[in-house]
Amino acid sequence: MVRVNARSPTREAPGGRWLLLIHQLPPKPDYFRVKVWRRLQRIGAVAIKSSVYALPHTDQAAEDFQWLRREIVAGGGEASVCQAAFVDGLSDGQIEAMFRTQRDAEYAELTRAAEDGDSDAARLDRRLAEIVSIDHFGAAGRRVAEAALAKARERRKPSTPAPPPSRARRTDPVQPGKGTHTWVTRVGVHVDRISSAWLIRRFIDPAARFQFVATQNHAPAPGERRFDMFEAEYTHEGDRCTFETLLARFGLEDAALAALAELVHDIDCKDGKFGRDETAGFERVIRGIVRRHATDEARLERGAAVLDDLYEAFGGPGGSRPTPRRKRR
């Protein structure tokens, strides 16, 4: 068992095909224990034994466990993330079966809701997409759930179209900091870092340069700003993802950006806080970008094009900037 390599873990990485979160939570408050348990369910981890949870060794799993470890420590608990290969006891096949069993139970619950006439088809679709995104080993219950949802859609009456999004009034642009800054983040960018980089370059620092580092503990040089990494100037704060932190810290008031922030939050934090209909589709697009493009630069470029279009769809006028409500810190 070895520590997670923060560079870019894959299933073929030496040291084992599994990631383990080993944690100990404080006895109180009860809500914190429930919060951690729900987050583990959201990311699709399975319990190997008490307080030991596993995920397949992927970039996304490493990020999910790292953020959860940080949250546990901030809440007064202890946690470690390890890369593991099982030599004795459980086999890889048995662990895969545990994942399938857990996903099958979730698919079965979704199937029952669809068959019982749950009228909120959009919510059912979102839940299906959430389960599929963590179904690493092809649980058999997916086909049954998809068939049940298809029948539910046939029974659903056409919904009334939603009113067009309102356009926020904007005046003066947010002024970037004096000079050009280099913005530093971790390698292997995903939804929060892709979206935050887009926000930085489009609304905060148009001449921003991005640098990608393999360590969480990068010490910034003069003129560098870190985002979405350990002890960064701009990262998760409370229950906010980095994109939300940037909006708050730079005082960007914009209905379209607020809508984007809700999508990024639910995908990155996996807590279902906002539950927007567009979240599942945006998550699939981001997943496709990550799979297709190996370099962080290419991911940012492709992601920026998608975010530009989404921003327009949510009512953001092209080429303008949101109104700041307070000076940047």
Image (spheres, rainbow, N blue to C red):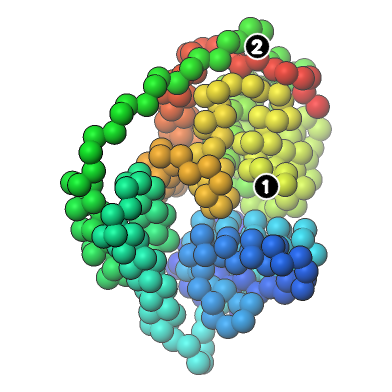
- Marks 2 and 1 sit apart, C-alpha to C-alpha, by 28 Å
The image quarter in which residue 244 lies: top right
The image quarter in which residue 108 lies: bottom left
Q: Nearer the viewer, residue 282 or 179?
A: 282
Q: Residue 235 location in percent, x, y?
A: 70, 42
Q: Residue 304 location in percent, x, y?
A: 48, 29
Amino acid bearing label 2: Pro
Q: Nearer the viewer, residue 231 or 104?
A: 104
Q: Nearer the viewer, residue 179 or 93?
A: 93
Where does the N terminus fall, quadrant-wise?
bottom right
Left or right? Give the position of 105 relative to 31: left
Amino acid bearing label 1: Asp
The label on residue 239 is 1
102 over 247 or under it: above or below: below
Q: Secondary structure at mark 2?
A: loop
Q: Look at 77% across and 47% down and name the residue there.
A: 231
Q: Look at 69% across and 36% down and name the residue there.
A: 245
Q: Look at 45% across and 21% down and name the residue there.
A: 165
